[in-house]
Image (cartoon, grey):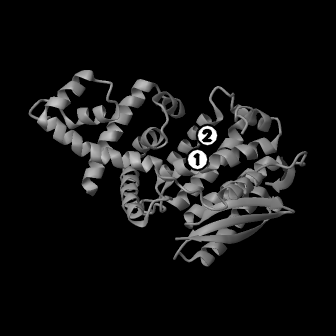
Amino acid sequence: MTSDRPLPAAAVHGDTAAFDELVRRHTGRMYRVALRIVGDPVEAEDVVQDAWISAWRALPRFRGEAAPATWLYRVVTNAALTHLRRRKPTVPLEAVPEPRTSDGPETTVLRNETTNDVLRAIASLDPSQRVPLVLRELEGLSYEEVAEVMGTGVPALRARLHRARVALMAKLEERR
Amino acid sequence: MSPFPCGRSVDELVAHLADRDDDPALARHVTGCADCEAELADLERRWDAVRETAVVAVPTPPGLVIRVLAAVRGIRPRLGAPPVEFVQDGDRVRVAERAVLAVCRQLAVEAAAELDLHVRGTAVEDGQLQVLVAARYPDPAIAAADELRSKVARQLLAHLGDAAPVVHVHLIDIAP
């Protein structure tokens, strides 16, 4: 697979296939991030659609300082936060899809319960805590990468992440 | 958080759990402190659940990439497309096709959200706006889709006058 780097510039110059290629490469990851932040599959697809529309519109302003993947993480987390701000209070946070696994049935059931508990605990946190948690602990980005996505400094990010981890641990304790 | 008899706190142990190398003095203390060791073991179990969640695959919904590509194509103007002309307050107004496509999508998304519908794509062709939507079971999807069509048609008429496209709403998915 060739690098993502030339694709945004090609798309800006009218190569629609280049943008489509970005969509093919990154939609799965963007859906995963969106789902882990908003906690609902239907809304996660709304977020992904909004994120790609925003990415398309913002393309002329993309200067290429960040890697396309980092830029798209930023676009999808912003779309997710916007979505959460608009969300009606009645929307349930309980609907998470069955995780895909190749283990046996008993292991699968236990793992699904564990995973659902974690995702529900994350979904019950303040949105400003969900984003760094999802990016760092579930997506595995470095502190520097998460800080770049969130447009903040590493010390501020570390402080926010710490509060988010403490809150998550407390939520998981409540769910036991 | 209230500290343990040793003076350390759960907050510090959570920080230790996430970044073990950050505080060597705490790392040394934990190995010899019964209170901290017990609490840390408990926190470890919860933290393991987070690590486990991080490696569980999140399946991309079937057809999502295709729907995203269609949504992006729905807001791309045709190459060399002439501006759309309409009468507003007695004056002839010319608007770029790009803006018309954006307005169509925006109005559809906003109206759909009010009706608990989820836009999965919009397309304008030959003066017709096609809006693809998903609904949640057991919401009254058909009635909502019909209301969406009327609502978007009214709003487009207000925005685009005689250039407003005819609106069609297609229910393409019922989500659980």
Identify whether B95 is placed above or below B161.
above
* The furthest residue to the front: A104
Residue name at image x 40 percent, y 27 percent: A156
**Secondary element at image label 2:** helix
Q: Name the residue under label 1.
A: A29
**Is residue A126 among the parts visible in the rendering?**
no
**Rendering coords of residue A12 (x, y %):** 78, 36
> Mark 2 or mark 1: which is in front?
1
Give the CA separation, mark 2 to mark 1. Answer: 10 Å
Which quadrant of the structure image shows residue A92?
bottom left
Residue B59: numbered disc = none
Rendered view: B166 above or below A157: below
The quarter holding residue A116 reads: bottom left
- For residue A39, side relative to residue B143 (left or right): left
Establish if B149 lies above or below A162.
Answer: below
Can you say which quadrant of the picture contains the N terminus of chain B? top left
Q: Image point 62% across, 47% down: which residue?
A: A51
The answer to whether A26 appears left or right of A128 in the picture is right
Type of residue at label 2? Leu
Residue at image x 53%, y 74%? B137
Within-10-Å neighbours for mark 2: few <14, some 14–19, many 20+: many
Q: Residue A72 carries which label?
A: 2
Where is residue A162 shown, x and y percent of the image? 34, 34
The relative height of residue B135 versus residue A155 in the rendered view (above or below) is below
Tell me the SS state at disc 1.
Answer: helix
Q: Which residue is drawn at 40% across and 55% down?
A: A115
Q: Are marks 2 and 1 in contact (CB under 8 Å)?
A: yes
Q: Looking at the picture, how far across and down is residue A128, in whole percent?
A: 42, 41
The amino acid sitting under disc 1 is: Arg
